[in-house]
Image (cartoon, rainbow, N blue to C red):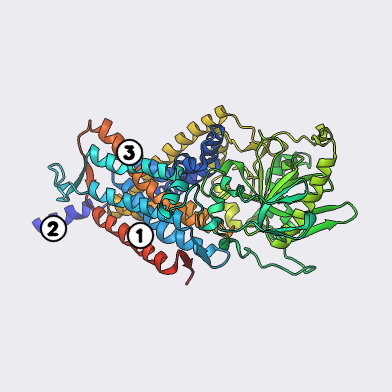
């Protein structure tokens, strides 16, 4: 009987739940993952970017502080929630798992997504990131060394005691990281023995030009007043979130196969490929509409885009009207402080006339988002990276950066822009001011609204859009979108709007993090596994997946060095801020400067050794390959 009772008691202790509860917890966790990623990328990062631009915070400092906090906010808030509210180790597990994910999955994904099949890394930047990440691992290891049993835990598992000094040791390293980022040129100069500002591997390209007149081919230089003026002391890309630090080899190959002149080019999106689910929505909308009221459903059914009947390398030249039309990527103002972001560069269809230049985004209802560019008289050119900077004649307004799909298209655009500048110089500037009928009002920065129907997408994407539509609508109407522009593409969001958006995002992140932590802890209980384990796996993958997507997009655009550097920089932030800051605050106000001892030592110390081993393997690989990562 005693044996039977013991068996019965053991069976009673096994966690059980209905199928409905399992589904509910999984759905809550999945929605929390999506909501945190969406509010971070679509609202939080742009709001912080606007604040950084308003206060003129340098790119390196903004990238290492505000923008790093925005990009890593899911890990940071999960750490806060698990420490202050649920008192579990899930936050620590999430950080550990994210570290592994960033080093293995994100870096590998960036290499596989690169244009050339390999990535050349900037030695100075990567060395900086590796050094401070290693410093964070060492600080974390020593902070976790005080392991003792506790009286109120009958499991027999030792607990880790983290003191206020331990917390400060982990946290304070990030201040040195920010200082080094802000003075990177001087640090490199000290190590290389150079005087003055140092240049990294990616800025070793000489400024050369050849030929005559406006048709000169620039390697890197400036066109002023339709004539070329090469200035070796004006590396304009140093202003663009470390673009100049991206090795030019990463831009060598285009994402799509180039086609010869006159050859038919398949479009990037065909309206004929409209999904059956989208057709069904249009059919239902038509059945319950009298024709006029169908306009109410236009946000669901309007799906014409410039890429529906044009390819990425298509150009349209009208000799009679003297116009040139083509695709170019335009850098977003609202992500220019971020090291890289999914929405950092936007594809637009440009039209260059005999005296003007304007563009529309590659999206539905594109005419409502038209931008007319100012009467520019100066452009800067970086041929190796296929980037053109349009200098705004009004120094108070922003400059524009364009990335071109190919060298052939770049030649055409430079020639046409030179012709336009000749007209601007010869014309009375007052005649070039936008006329009232051309003023379009507020625009967004070429990004689709959270509630805009994903026309032309697959059935699966449309299905998830409809499932998440209530959450999308709630986010859309409760968090202000700062990504608004005037008709000439200049930002018009105020500091008050950016501050309100930031506060709203913080509220969303707190709620989303709590939902994620609570649901995953409940799943861990049902699976009878430690909270830290589900943090290492499910939580880490869910919070890091958006970073993987962003790094793959960056690598496809030739910015793979940024993707790799950002992955390592995120790891430094996750350890020193994601863990260090909550620990400092908790040991200060939560335990009144007494050690925090609620962390069970369930493989945590071994996890630190795993992080160190993976980093060591990466360093050996970089040294052996000369800071070049290959697919094979």
Q: Is residue 492 above or below residue 576?
A: above
Residue 256 position, x and y percent, is 65, 65
Pointer 2 with pointer 1, Cβ within 8 A:
no
Residue 455 position, x and y percent, is 67, 51
Q: Earlier in the sequence, mark 3 or mark 2?
A: 2
Q: Marks 2 and 1, Cα distance to the nearest angstrom?
A: 51 Å
**Farthest residue toward the left?**
2
| Residue positioned 55% across, 55% down in the render | 203
In this picture, residue 451 sits left or right of residue 613: right
* Residue 615 circle label: 1
Q: Which mark lies nearer to you, 3 or 2?
A: 3
Q: Which mark lies nearer to you, 2 or 1?
A: 1
Q: Marks 3 and 1, Cα distance to the nearest angstrom?
A: 25 Å
- Label 2 belongs to which residue? 4
In this picture, residue 437 sits left or right of residue 500: right
| Residue positioned 32% across, 50% down in the render | 135
Q: Nearer the viewer, residue 267 or 169?
A: 169
Residue 187 position, x and y percent, is 42, 48
Pointer 3 with pointer 1, Cβ within 8 A:
no
In this picture, residue 404 sits left or right of residue 559: right
State the image quarter where residue 611 is shown: bottom left
**Label 1 SS:** helix
């Amino acid at each position: 009987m005693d044996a039977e009772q013991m068996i019965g008691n053991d069976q009673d202790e096994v966690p059980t739940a209905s199928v409905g509860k399992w589904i509910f917890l999984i759905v809550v966790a999945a929605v929390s993952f999506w909501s945190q990623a969406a509010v971070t990328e679509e609202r939080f990062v742009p709001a912080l970017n606007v604040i950084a631009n308003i206060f003129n915070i340098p790119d390196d400092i903004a990238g290492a502080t505000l923008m790093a906090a925005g990009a890593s906010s899911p890990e940071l808030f999960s750490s806060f929630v698990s420490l202050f509210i649920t008192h579990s180790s899930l936050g620590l597990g999430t950080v550990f798992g994210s570290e592994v994910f960033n080093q293995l999955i994100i870096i590998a994904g960036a290499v596989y997504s690169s244009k050339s099949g390999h990535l050349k890394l900037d030695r100075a930047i990567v060395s900086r990131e590796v050094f401070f990440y290693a410093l964070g691992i060492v600080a974390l290891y020593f902070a976790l060394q005080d392991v003792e049993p506790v009286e109120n835990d009958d499991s027999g598992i030792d607990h880790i005691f983290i003191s206020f000094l331990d917390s400060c040791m982990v946290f304070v390293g990030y201040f040195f990281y920010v200082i080094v980022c802000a003075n990177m040129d001087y640090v490199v100069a000290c190590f290389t023995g150079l005087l003055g500002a140092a240049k990294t591997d990616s800025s070793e390209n000489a400024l050369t030009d050849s030929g005559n007149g406006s048709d000169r081919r620039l390697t890197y230089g400036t066109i002023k007043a339709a004539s070329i003026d090469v200035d070796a002391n004006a590396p304009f890309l140093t202003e663009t979130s470390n673009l100049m630090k991206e090795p030019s080899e990463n831009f060598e190959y285009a994402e799509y196969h180039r086609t010869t002149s006159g050859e038919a080019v398949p479009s990037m999106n065909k309206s004929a490929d409209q999904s059956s689910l989208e057709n069904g929505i249009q059919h239902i909308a038509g059945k319950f509409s009298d024709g006029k009221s169908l306009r109410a459903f236009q946000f669901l059914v309007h799906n014409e885009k410039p890429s529906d009947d044009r390819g990425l390398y298509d150009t349209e030249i009208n000799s009679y009207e003297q116009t040139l039309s083509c695709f170019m990527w335009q850098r977003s103002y609202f992500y220019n402080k971020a090291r890289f972001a999914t929405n950092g560069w936007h594809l637009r269809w440009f039209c260059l006339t005999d005296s003007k230049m304007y563009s529309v985004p590659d999206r539905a209802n594109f005419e409502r988002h038209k931008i007319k560019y100012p009467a520019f008289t100066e452009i800067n050119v970086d041929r190796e990276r296929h980037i053109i900077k349009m200098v705004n004649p009004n120094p108070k307004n922003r400059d524009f950066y364009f990335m071109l799909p190919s060298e052939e298209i770049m030649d055409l655009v430079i020639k046409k822009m030179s012709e336009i500048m000749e007209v601007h110089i010869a014309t009375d500037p007052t005649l070039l001011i936008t006329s009232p009928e051309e003023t379009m009002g507020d625009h967004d920065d070429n990004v689709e609204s959270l509630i805009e129907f994903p026309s032309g997408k697959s059935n699966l994407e449309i299905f998830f859009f409809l499932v998440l539509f209530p959450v999308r609508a709630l986010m859309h109407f409760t968090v202000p979108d700062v990504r608004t522009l005037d008709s000439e593409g200049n930002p018009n969001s105020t500091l008050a709007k950016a501050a309100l958006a930031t506060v709203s995002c913080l509220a969303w992140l707190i709620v989303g993090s709590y939902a994620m932590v609570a649901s995953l802890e409940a799943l861990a209980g049902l699976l009878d596994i430690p909270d830290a384990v589900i943090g290492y796996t499910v939580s880490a993958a869910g919070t890091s997946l958006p970073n993987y997507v962003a790094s793959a997009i960056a690598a496809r655009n030739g910015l793979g060095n940024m993707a790799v550097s950002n992955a390592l920089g995120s790891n430094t932030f996750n350890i020193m801020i994601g863990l260090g800051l909550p620990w400092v605050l908790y040991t200060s106000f939560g335990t009144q400067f007494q050690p925090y001892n609620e962390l069970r030592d369930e493989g945590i110390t071994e996890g630190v050794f795993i992080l160190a081993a993976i980093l060591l393997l990466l360093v050996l690989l970089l040294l052996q390959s000369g800071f070049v990562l290959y697919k094979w």
